Amino acid sequence: MDESKKGYIIKENEIIVQRELTKLDLFVKEFLDILKKHSDYLIVSGFVSISTGRTRGTEDIDCIIPLMNQENFKNLFIDLQKNGFWCYQGDTDDETYNYIKNLDSIRFAKTNEIFPNMELIPFDDSKKAKSFEFKNPQKIRIKDFDFKIPPLEFEILYKEIILAGKKDLEDAKHLRIFFSDILKKEKFKEYEFIIKDELR
């Protein structure tokens, strides 16, 4: 099959999705351009499916980050505020860092707006599944917007096994169909063990 007819091509292990950028893409790109200066990251959950062509609305984008120390978080927080973002959980980095320290998520949106928002989800080494996907990212690109997501097989199984809501199962189905030519059975087997360990 002609690769261009799949909706994506692969170059040097990067998935290039062949579509135009949306307003949601531009919001995520703007946020990540700031975040990348202060922390590594991984985009997970709904936006993975949406970015690869699934048509559905979303109000939040999930992004996992390694646990940050307070000084690094302060620099990120101030940079986001300078660039027109506000945090749902507080107006200062001091009050907001308590959420990060406790591995609780926080949300940012553009000033005077509520949606869309970016949910930052901190994790540490005790979170085995998050640690694994974080260390094994898949690069993806739309036009000049490049970002990192989990391995496709991992993302699919996580939605099917852990999240398992109606929207998650539909997302997983989309990914299975859209990427049917490149998904690997052996990776599903490997990742299933890692993901199911989270249920124990």
Image (cartoon, helix red, strand yellow):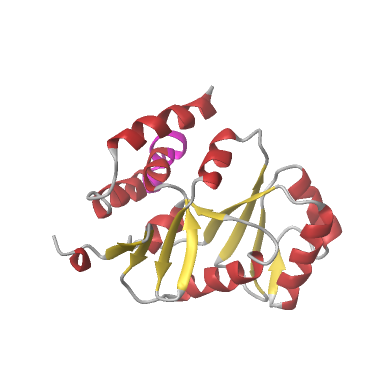
Q: Which residues are magenta?
A: 158-168
The main secondary structure of the magenta stretch is helix
Quadrant of the image occupied by residue 11: bottom left
Q: Residue at (37%, 61%) from the top-left corner?
A: 12
Outermost residue to the front: 12
Task: List x then y, in percent, for residue 29.
Answer: 53, 71
Quadrant of the image occupied by residue 115: bottom right
Q: Nearer the viewer, residue 174 or 67?
A: 67
Outermost residue to the top: 200
Instruction: Locate the C terminus by quadrant.
Output: top right
Q: Residue at (34%, 66%) from the top-left corner?
A: 17
Task: List x then y, in percent, for residue 167.
Answer: 39, 48
Q: Residue at (71%, 43%) from the top-left corner?
A: 103
Q: How many discs mark residues in the rendered view? A: 0
Left or right side of 77 for 143: left
Task: List x then y, in percent, for residue 26.
Answer: 50, 75
Is there any visible trace of residue 56 in the rendered image? no
Task: List x then y, in percent, for residue 175.
Answer: 32, 51
Is there any visible trace of residue 78 in the rendered image? yes
Q: Is residue 129 magenta?
A: no
Q: Nearer the viewer, residue 110 or 29?
A: 29
Left or right side of 107 for 166: left
Q: Is residue 164 magenta?
A: yes
